[in-house]
Amino acid sequence: MLSKDTILNSAKNEEKIEKRHLMRLKYLNGYSILNGMNIEAELADIKRLLTEISRKLDELLEEKEITAMMKLSEVSLKDFLEDEPDIYSIEDVKVRYR
C-alpha cells in the first residue's frame, strides 16, 4: 500500500509536469500575442536581435581575418628576416631605468 507522502509527492510531480506542458502549449500557440504583445512588436524585436547578432559576427570574422593575415605575414617573412643581420644587439635594446 502506498503511503500518504508518496501519493502527495506523486501528485506534486504530476502537477509540475502539467504546468510545464501548459507553458509549452501557451508558447507554441502564441500566448504572448494574447498577453498584449502584437506580432509587429515581436518582429521588430527579432529584427533588432538579428541585427545585433550579425554585427557581432562581422566583428568576430574581422578579428579572425586580421589574425590570419598577421600569421601569414609572419610565416611568409620568416625566411626573409632570418637571413638579415640583427641591427641591434641585446645590449642596445635593454632599457636602463634610473
Image: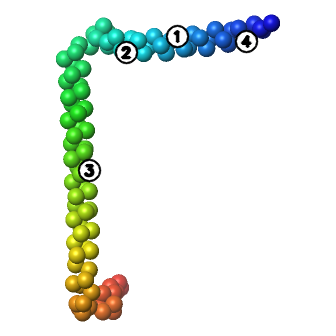
Give the CA separation, mark 4 to mark 3. Answer: 54 Å
Q: Position of residue 33 (x, y in %)?
A: 28, 11
Q: Residues within 10 Å of mark 1 (few under 14, many from 20)?
A: few
Q: Which residue is mark 4?
A: 6
The amino acid type of the residue labelled 2 equals Tyr
**Residue plotted at (61% across, 14% down):** 13
Whichever of callouts 1 and 2 sits on the residue coming sooner in the sequence is: 1
Q: Position of residue 38 (x, y in %)?
A: 23, 13
Q: Which residue is mark 1?
A: 18
The amino acid type of the residue labelled 4 equals Thr
Residue 49, quarter of the rendered image: top left
Q: Quadrant of the C terminus?
A: bottom left
Q: Which residue is mark 2?
A: 27
The tag on residue 60 is 3
Label 1: element kind? helix
Whichever of callouts 1 and 4 sits on the residue coming sooner in the sequence is: 4
Label 4: element kind? helix
